[in-house]
């Protein structure tokens, strides 16, 4: 079992550090002060904390007004309430004029909804944000990466969206690699038989699958694609050209998220087999995170099978 961290706590602690240095920093909630562990921020910065109640569209519009006056507002609540309920406001009031608003979406993925059920499992958020021009889109792996990502998106010009988890988030078990916005991280490198691209808490499973494949004589490289926009086109294509076969794994609908992003790059610039693992275009059940990932074919065994299949397809294509 992986160690457990708290991405929500990591975000608010880092935001408080930023706010102490940058007086432009403002936090806007939508009845979500408890969701994102924001009481310490509200207590230390009462003049820079606003809770609009259950009114996410108003929260985004308010943040847009603040940003137009030179402030740097963070809108933080559940991921789906930002990306779906307030999608028009995000697109028209913030992204279209390119304002410096940061959106923090909690409960990203199917694994984060075990307490609150299917209405609080948000598996569409990254895909939605990827379709809106100009938004930086980040899906950090764990609490340490959330801290680094929060610092990074504060410096971005224009809007940014960062997905965080439930507050009981697996810590990625690998040698530390620093976060760099827009650049993949190589977390395991056993060779170039196949590339495994993943992000978020499911990275542990990708690393485990690569280790098992090595025991079978299959050499995999595992890349953390934490930034979906701007995506690391050069870094990803380099791995695809070297391996000529790829697997993607994500706690998200396979449509629109990481799998789609990798497949788009491969299709345009280096056509190779890309096996996509994630939520298979269905509404998920609620339940315990590890069991859900297994149920929807995101287990370590599933990643291994997908890697072997991608290699087999590559070899078949090479023989033609």
Image (spheres, rainbow, N blue to C red):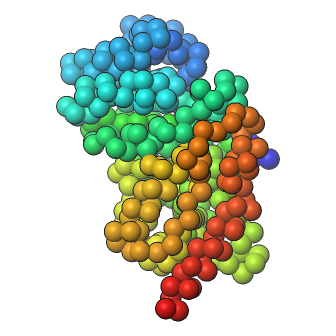
Residue drawn 71% across and 43% down? 292
Residue 224 position (above or below residue 125): below
x and y percentages locating residue 153 in the rendered image: 38, 38
Residue 316 position (above or below residue 270): below
Q: Is residue 4 visible?
A: no
Q: Is residue 86 visible?
A: yes
Residue drawn 64% across and 50% down? 202
Q: Residue furthest front?
A: 282
Residue 93 position (above or below residue 44): below
Residue 98 position (above or below residue 319): above
The front one of 175 and 78 is 78
Residue drawn 37% across and 18% down? 57
Direction from residue 106 to residue 213 in the image, left or right: right
x and y percentages locating residue 222 in the rendered image: 58, 64
Q: Residue furthest right?
A: 1
x and y percentages locating residue 101 in the rendered image: 32, 28
x and y percentages locating residue 4 in the rendered image: 72, 38
Direction from residue 84 to residue 95 in the image, left or right: left
Direction from residue 242 to residue 174 in the image, left or right: right
Residue drawn 41% across and 68% down? 266
The front one of 76 and 274 is 274
Figure label count? 0
């Amino acid at each position: 079992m992986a160690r457990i961290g708290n991405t929500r706590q990591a975000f608010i602690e880092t935001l408080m550090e930023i706010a102490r240095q940058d007086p432009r920093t403002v936090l806007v909630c939508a009845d979500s002060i408890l969701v994102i562990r924001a009481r310490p921020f509200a207590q230390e910065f009462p003049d820079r904390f606003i809770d609009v109640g259950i009114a996410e569209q108003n929260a985004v519009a308010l943040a847009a007004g603040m940003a137009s006056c030179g402030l740097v507002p963070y809108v933080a609540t559940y991921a789906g309430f930002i990306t779906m309920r307030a999608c028009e406001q995000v697109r028209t009031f913030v992204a279209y004029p390119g304002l410096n608003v940061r959106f923090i979406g909690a409960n990203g993925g199917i694994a984060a909804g075990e307490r609150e059920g299917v209405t609080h499992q948000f598996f569409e958020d990254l895909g939605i944000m990827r379709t809106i021009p100009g938004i930086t889109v980040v899906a950090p792996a764990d609490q340490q990466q959330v801290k680094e990502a929060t610092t990074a998106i504060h410096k971005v010009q224009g809007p940014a969206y960062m997905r965080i988890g439930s507050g009981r988030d697996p810590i990625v078990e690998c040698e530390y690699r620093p976060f760099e916005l827009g650049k993949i991280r190589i977390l395991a490198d056993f060779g170039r038989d196949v590339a495994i691209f993943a992000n978020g808490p499911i990275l542990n499973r990708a690393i485990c699958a690569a280790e098992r494949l090595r025991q079978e004589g299959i050499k995999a490289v595992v890349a953390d694609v934490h930034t979906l926009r701007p995506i690391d086109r050069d870094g990803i294509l380099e791995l695809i050209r070297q391996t000529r076969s790829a697997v993607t794994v994500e706690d998200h609908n396979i449509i629109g998220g990481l799998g789609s992003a990798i497949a788009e790059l491969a299709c345009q610039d280096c056509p190779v087999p890309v096996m996509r693992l994630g939520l298979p275009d269905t509404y998920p059940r609620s339940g315990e995170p590890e069991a859900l990932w297994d149920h929807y074919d995101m287990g370590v065994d599933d990643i291994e099978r997908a890697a072997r299949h991608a290699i087999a397809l590559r070899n078949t294509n090479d023989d033609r």
